[in-house]
Amino acid sequence: DAKTTQPPSMDCAEGRAANLPCNHSTISGNEYVYWYRQIHSQGPQYIIHGLKNNETNEMASLIITEDRKSSTLILPHATLRDTAVYYCIVSAGDNQGGKLIFGQGTELSVKP
Amino acid sequence: SAVISQKPSRDICQRGTSLTIQCQVDSQVTMMFWYRQQPGQSLTLIATANQGSEATYESGFVIDKFPISRPNLTFSTLTVSNMSPEDSSIYLCSVEDALSYEQYFGPGTRLTVT
């Protein structure tokens, strides 16, 4: 079973920041937090991942709470092309065979 | 990042038949994975396919139904055997980048069983 909880859907205005929350209260010390997204009819796309420190790349920022029980994915300036299902996944990477267990995700709708 | 292709991109099959899906990667990778995405649902991991060893199946998936081959570090196949309408899904393969731990996904194979 997935070890994360996400709201099923969110809306965001184009050009505004999209903040997608994720709860992972049972996360283990060696597990990373991964975010992927799936645009309709495409394969999932990697966004970002982190262990305990906040991370930023060209797509998004990942904020992980100090107790690591929750995190937030931030898309700083959402565009219509960011409309997708966003999946938050905890995984120990190679320590568990690289497996990703997907939950139901958050369906983000970016509106003009 | 790895570029992954899958064949066929879609197919319509009759119940009781089998379909083999191919996954080709443009670089050598150790770990490959097969997922199923039923209509309107999230992705479910079917099995892990590492070169040189038998595939490892997740709970609810068996080798007789979903035999997997992994003949080399750039290629894998998944066969959906003795198909029924419940097998209608999108089947996706993915690979893991050993350095970054990112996974890259293929475009998927959309299977409809009639």
Image: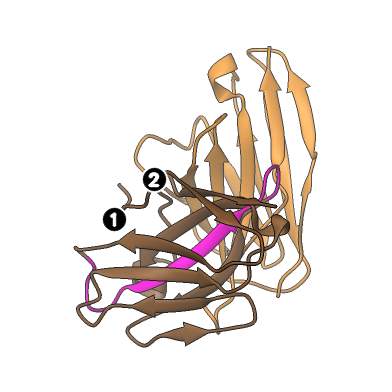
Chain colours: A brown, B orange
Residue at image location 59% in from the left, 19% down from the top: B82
What x and y, as percent, mark residue A17?
55, 69
Nearer to the camera, B105 or A84:
A84
Q: How many marks?
A: 2
Using the rendered view, name the quadrant where residue A93 is placed.
Answer: bottom left
> Which label number is shown at residue A3?
1
Q: CA distance from mark 1 to mark 2?
A: 16 Å
- Dot 1 lies on which element? loop
Chain of the residue under the numbered disc 1 shown in the image? A
- Determine whether B103 is above or below B15 in the image: below
Amino acid tagged 1 = Lys
| Label 2: how many Cα within 10 Å (few below 14, some 14–19, many 20+) | few
Residue B103 seen in the current view:
no
Nearer to the camera, A84 or A32:
A84
Report which residue position mark 2 lands on: B58
Extent of the magenta region: A27-42
| Label 1: how many Cα within 10 Å (few below 14, some 14–19, many 20+) | some
- State yes or no: residue B97 in magenta: no
Residue A26 seen in the current view:
yes
Residue at image location 57% in from the left, 24% down from the top: B87
What x and y, as percent, mark residue A79?
69, 62
Nearer to the camera, B20 or A17:
A17
Amino acid tagged 2 = Glu
- Determine whether A42 is above or below B100 in the image: above
